[in-house]
Amino acid sequence: MSPDVDLTVPLPGRHAVRDRLLALDCRLFEVAAERHWPGAERVLPRLSRSANHGVLWFATAAAMAVARTPRARRAAARGLASLSLASLTINTLGKRSVRRPRPVLDPVPLVRQLKRQPITTSFPSGHSASAAAFAAGVALESPAWGAAIAPVAFSVAMSRVYTGVHFPSDVLAGAALGVGAAYAVRGLVPTRAQVSPPARPRTEAPALGDGEGLVVVANTASGTADRVGALRDALSKAEVVECPPDEVGAELDKAAARARVLGVCGGDGTVNAAAAAALRHGLPLAVLPGGTLNHFAYDLGVEDVRDLAGAVRQGEAVRVDVGRFVCDGREGIFLNTLSLGVYPELVRERERWAGRIGGWPAGVLGALRVLRADRHPLAVEVGGETRPLWLLFVGNGVYHRMGLGPGRRADLADGLLDVRAVHGSRRPALRLLAAAAAGPLTRSPAHAAVQVGRLRLAGVEPGTPLAYDGEVTEVAGEVTLEKLAEALTVYRPLPRN
């Protein structure tokens, strides 16, 4: 066949290296066309057609989401984001920059050829870019899922040469572009492995090979049945107590009285109650995420039963800080965040609607209702000066934003409270949006941030709602916030050498 290649406007004169590469590309295409691949006539053309418009990869992402593991869902989302970026780049730049004709189909057996031949230019291969982007994106988040998908992605890429619609260099360029798109997405939204806090300070904890001595309290309202079943299979001698939300506190105290290790399965509020019980009884805590957000468990690096069971068997644990608030002789703890102002009102609205429409829709509806309401800023005395605030956020540890992703903690034992304030004004929605856009900026017209070990608030009006780890209480007068440094021992998988 003739190496008929039009690279937009051909340059005058001879280009020996380019001509040799194009000739080699054509020869490789002919070799592939001449070879007989057993069984491929039935599989590869169908596989190639199934990847049209990304249908194969959207179906794969849906199947991964059905797996109901956070890592699989994140991997699916990352794969689709990478695919979208690769497709956008191919269609806006790649195909229009190098206008290369498709290969001549004469050497390709008729049984291999696609019924509907593509009419776009050949370089680079969009199917190969999408396949590589999806597989690489998935692998960056979940190597296990990536290993399962890689052979399919490779087969899709090879099918484009096998069916005669692309030269080998088209496929290689498309695959390289797809992998680049996956890494570009990772630069914008880091993977969880990139932002996991360091495994420090390490500490000793009981190594329970079969789970004997571990008593786990599971909140049945969090939809924990599947995880509880998996936990019983992984740690056969662990005791599991399932109970409704109003019985969680009492069951935690009973469990702590007879356990070597206190375990919990539920959302952030349930984990908060378990941490308080573990502190009172001086026990290490084993956390299995079972709620909607699970910030503390995920920041620990515990996403599923496999992570927790491995840490419990090996006795792998660290000490983490605990935040504490004190008001009128009452005290409470927070593992993630505490806030006053607009956010506690949002939590109340979300809980009001969550049972009817679900957690995420309830959160959106709550935000709209709170921001549209005619409210006055919260007046709080800080450092002897009264300040109007729409929101006072306090994190147990400093939150860092990486790329476009939400803030994550780089250290769970840094000894600091991350204090963020949104100043009061006549337009709370505008202020809060401006503060969100400011992100990690420590100073902006709407937003201020400081890291301290202790904070005292005075002049808080009676009945002011305070939200901590998804729970809401009321405070008044003086509120003191402080860190309990390395107060809690928790199990978490440690990196292997």
Image (cartoon, rainbow, N blue to C red):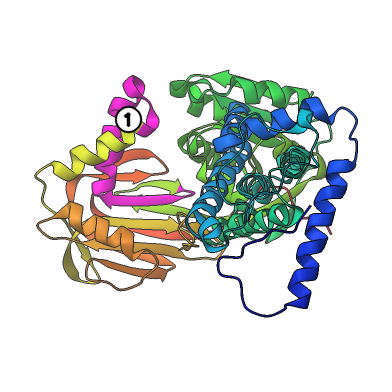
Magenta region includes residue 340: yes
Magenta region includes residue 451: no
Q: Which residues are magenta?
A: 334-360
Tell me the SS state at disc 1: helix
The percent position of residue 107, horizontal first and vertical second, equals: 81, 42
Amino acid, disc 1: Glu
Mark 1 highlights which residue?
351
In the image, residue 242 sits, relative to residue 208, either above or below, namely above
In the rendered structure, the answer to whether residue 293 lies left or right of residue 125 reads left
Image quarter (top left, top right, bottom left or bottom right) of the C terminus: bottom right
The percent position of residue 199, horizontal first and vertical second, equals: 69, 58
Residue nearest the viewer, comparing 480 with 181: 181
The image quarter in which residue 234 lies? top right
Asked if one can make out residue 459 in the rendered structure from this viewpoint, the answer is no
The image quarter in which residue 200 lies? bottom right
The percent position of residue 42, horizontal first and vertical second, equals: 79, 25
In the rendered structure, the answer to whether residue 220 lies left or right of residue 435 reads right
Query: Which secondary structure type mostly characterizes the magenta part of the structure?
Result: helix
The 10 Å Cα crowd at callout 1, few under 14, some 14 to 19, many 20 or more, is some
Tag count in the figure? 1
The percent position of residue 348, horizontal first and vertical second, equals: 28, 35
In the rendered structure, the answer to whether residue 417 lies left or right of residue 54 reads left
